[in-house]
Image (spheres, helix red, strand yellow):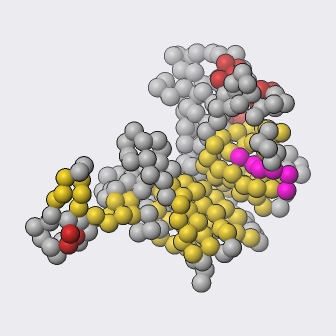
Amino acid sequence: MDTGNVLASVECSETRIVDDIDNDFSCDDLQALINDDKTVNLDLEGIVAVDDGFWLVHEGRGTIDEEKRPIESINLLIHVNYVGVITRVLTLPAEVNEMQLRFGFEGVASYGDYIVVAHQRAWGDEDHPRISFYNDATNAWFHVFYPLDSPESQNGGWVGIGDIHHVGEGEFIVLERDNQGGPDAAIKKIYSFDITNLELILTKTLVHDILEDVSSKIGGEFGFFLFGIVHVSSDLTRSPTALAFEKVEGLTISHGNVWISTDNDGADDNSGETQLQNLGDLWE
């Protein structure tokens, strides 16, 4: 809820269309995020609990210099209290927003005085997506870069960050995924990185390949069901086919166990199923 008009006070501009392209986060765009009853229309992609509430990230909408996807919202780092009232809203530096790609804030974690935000994909001419650190004590940002795996799917596509979580003592884990599902999926992994010896381009270590964990097996000895029709394989030795969830986008640790969740992205192109899985202690 934007009861105190905190979100409503975010800096915005007059709408300007230049060469048929809208690159501005306008005051009309801002108003579209807030309803008359002070509820809000946000694309929340990450959450972390802190002593006085929660930090959330809202993924921006639109890409700079793209006519078909004009800027409708910038990315926002939002603090709410324990009853969901917005108390602070932070934005990226202007020079970073000027590179905005529609694949923006995708996860948030906390580490000491820092709120740590993962960008899903690289912006502008940059080679890697940013991990952005906001210092809550100094009100300043700094950024490092996370090197993604290259796409491996038979269908091509891209690879991006799905979520981030602080394990402790400067170690973070990151969900990395491609934008492919079903038999085309190739990259669903958890990596770690450490910032105690911070580098501009982070060094990552594989923790666990979760492709099998987020895949369902069909076929094999007893055939499979498809749209209500039973097909029995003529080759009873045929290996099952793995159908993987595409959007693995939630990651946390509870009592030493790593938990992941999938985003069904609505039900237009799939069954609507969402999975929450306990992967156990991956450091045993």
Q: Residue at x 51, y 16 (%)?
A: 20
In the picture as drawn, the residue positioned furthest to the left comes out as: 234
Quadrant showing the C terminus: bottom right
In front of the other: 200 or 181: 181
Q: In this view, does 2 lie to the left or right of 203?
A: right
Q: Could you tell whether 62 is left or right of 33 in the image?
A: left
The quarter in which the N terminus is drawn is top right
Is 68 one of the magenta-colored residues?
A: no
**x and y, in percent, of residue 31 in the image:** 69, 22
Magenta residues: mostly which secondary structure?
strand
Q: Is residue 284 visible?
A: yes
Identify the residue at image location x=61%, y=39%.
Answer: 43
Compared with 200, 141 (above or below) is above
The magenta segment: 51-56
Q: Whole-percent x and y of residue 187? A: 43, 61
Magenta highlight on residue 54? yes
Please give left or right for residue 217 compared with residue 254 in the image.
Answer: left
Q: What residue is drawn where x is 23% and y is 61%?
A: 224
